[in-house]
Image: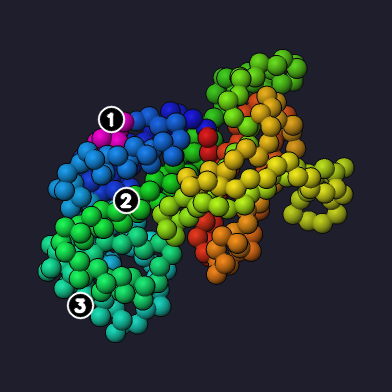
């Protein structure tokens, strides 16, 4: 789905990062045709265009690790931070939280800003150990580390933002005149397909526990062959046939999973990821995502990414 159809406002970007200058520059750089393009621009803006004052503004928007924002806070950014930390501190004892608060105070006194860490997928103990280890850094080194951690947080929030926007657009897109004409053209056997520049089904994998692309994940694409469609219940007659295999590169993108065909054969497809090999200590030996392509959708592109952590995953239909 083209990102140009989405309205991403300055306040949306500020929830992702917390810096006003960053948000303004992201609006100026918009629109983006994909999440990857937006992240590439965000990294350039964050590390090359804004100054240290913008970094400190973003740091200050966070509540202290392990501490909720004040009841009077109206910051969506701060509330998002607490949600991201909630799993790590759900069962933390009072004494452990007290120790964390003491180290937070020491850190802030030494560096002049709060301890910043991408909390997704990390435990309380891991974050406390990281805080203690980073306390020994020189201030200039620690400032750069904190900025990198902030960028990880920003990228995860951008992925969530694009997912939410894509869902909102998809709910209304079918009412657009061009979509009605495409459906009508399909019934009339009028082939007015745009020329493709890539296979009609693609994917990428983002490791949200690290805030980085997942490289080297084996990916399989299959199509269902049978007299009835597969369903939640049992009894469907048929089996899955392999269409193609690949593995993700350093940017998390898979290689071609199928030929560059103009019209995608309608049916049920399944993309499977060898998550057990990529994350041996995780919960999922593999992840499979099944989806349908209808007759009216055979000219469209299906980008089905995987956002993975050791104990959770999500997906969406992207561009």
Sooner in the amino-acid sequence: mark 3 or mark 2: 3
Location of residue 122 by image quarter: bottom left
Whether residue 34 is visible? yes
> CA gap, disc 3 to disc 1?
41 Å
Residue 67 image point, x, y percent: 27, 69
Q: From the viewer's perspective, tell me whether residue 67 is left or right of residue 182.
A: left
Disc number lying in front (1 or 2): 2
Q: Which mark is residue 151?
A: 2
For label 3, the SS is: helix
Q: Main secondary structure of the magenta part?
A: helix
Location of residue 284 by image quarter: bottom right
Location of residue 190 by image quarter: top right
According to the picture, the residue beneath numbered tag 1 turns out to be 28
Residue that appears at 75% across and 17% down: 189
Residue 25 colored in magenta in the image? yes
Q: Which mark is residue 63?
A: none
Residue that appears at 52% across and 64% down: 310
> CA gap, disc 1 to disc 2?
19 Å
Residue 19 image point, x, y percent: 23, 46
According to the picture, the residue beneath numbered tag 3 turns out to be 102
Residue that appears at 58% across and 25% down: 197
- For label 1, count other residues whose C-alpha is less than 10 Å away and answer few (under 14), some (14-19) or many (20+): few
Whether residue 305 is visible? no
Disc number lying in front (3 or 2): 2
| Magenta region, residue range | 23-29
Residue 297 image point, x, y percent: 66, 30
């Amino acid at each position: 789905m083209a990102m140009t159809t989405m309205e991403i406002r300055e306040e949306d970007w500020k929830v992702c990062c917390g810096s006003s200058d960053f948000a303004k520059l992201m609006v100026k750089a918009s629109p983006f045709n994909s999440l990857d393009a937006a992240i590439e621009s965000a990294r350039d803006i964050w590390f090359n265009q804004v100054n240290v004052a913008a970094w400190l503004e973003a740091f200050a928007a966070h509540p202290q690790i392990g501490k909720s924002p004040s009841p009077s806070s109206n910051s969506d950014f701060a509330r998002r931070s607490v949600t991201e930390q909630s799993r790590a501190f759900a069962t933390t004892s009072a004494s452990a939280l007290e120790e964390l608060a003491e180290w937070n105070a020491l850190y802030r006194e030494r560096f002049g800003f709060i301890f910043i860490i991408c909390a997704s997928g990390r435990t309380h103990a891991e974050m406390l150990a990281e805080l203690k280890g980073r306390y020994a850094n020189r201030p200039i080194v620690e400032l750069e580390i904190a900025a990198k951690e902030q960028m990880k947080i920003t990228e995860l929030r951008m992925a969530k933002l694009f997912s939410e926007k894509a869902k909102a657009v998809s709910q209304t897109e079918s009412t657009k005149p061009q979509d009605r004409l495409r459906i009508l053209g399909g019934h009339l056997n009028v082939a007015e397909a745009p020329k493709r520049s890539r296979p009609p089904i693609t994917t990428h994998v983002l490791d949200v526990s690290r805030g980085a692309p997942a490289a080297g994940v084996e990916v399989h694409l299959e199509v269902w062959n049978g007299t009835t469609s597969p369903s939640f219940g049992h009894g469907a007659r048929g089996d899955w046939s392999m269409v193609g295999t690949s593995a993700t590169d350093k940017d998390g993108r898979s290689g071609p999973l199928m030929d560059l065909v103009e019209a995608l054969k309608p049916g049920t497809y399944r993309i499977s990821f060898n998550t057990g090999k990529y994350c041996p200590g995780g919960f999922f030996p593999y992840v499979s995502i099944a989806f349908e392509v209808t007759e009216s959708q055979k000219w469209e592109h299906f980008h089905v990414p995987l956002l993975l952590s050791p104990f959770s995953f999500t997906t969406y239909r992207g561009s």
